[in-house]
Image (cartoon, rainbow, N blue to C red):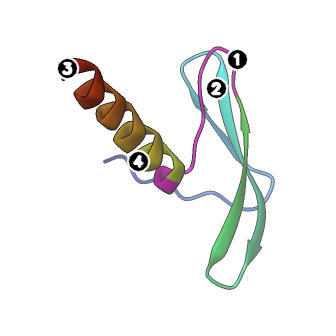
Amino acid sequence: MLVLSRQRDESIFIGDNIKITVVDIRGDKVRLGIEAPTEIPVHRQEVYEAIQRENQRKTEEAAK
């Protein structure tokens, strides 16, 4: 895992077309702004995991 330090309003780039900016820092919470092409899905981890579980459930139902 690459670990970077950034301050408010500083950014990092992933490839040429994904930009992540530190928008705000309050206590132990960091707000991030993410600019990415619309064809690249961006989800919080818990949402991503729920989507994966639902896809797995659908795959298992289709196999019956």
* First reached walking from the N terminus: tag 1 or tag 4: 1
Residue located at (61% from left, 15% from top): 16
Q: Is residue 40 left or right of residue 33?
A: left
Kind of residue at disc 2: Ile
Kind of residue at disc 3: Ala
Residue found at the very far front of the displayed protein: 64
* Residue on which disc 4 sits: 49
Is residue 43 part of the magenta span, yes or no?
yes
Q: Is residue 42 left or right of residue 21?
A: left
Q: Please, is residue 10 above or below residue 18 in the view? A: below
Residue located at (74% from left, 49% from top): 10
* Residue on which disc 1 sits: 37
Residue stretch in magenta: 36-46
Percent x, y of residue 36: 69, 25
Task: Give the mark toward the camera: 1 or 4.
Answer: 4
Task: Give the mark toward the camera: 4 or 2.
Answer: 4
Is residue 44 part of the magenta span, yes or no?
yes
Residue found at the very far bottom of the displayed protein: 27
Kind of residue at disc 1: Pro
Secondary element type, mark 2? strand
* First reached walking from the N terminus: tag 3 or tag 1: 1
Q: Is the magenta region chiefly helix, strand or loop?
A: loop
The label number, if any, that marks residue 18 in the structure image: 2
Residue located at (32% from left, 37% from top): 57
* Residue on which disc 3 sits: 63
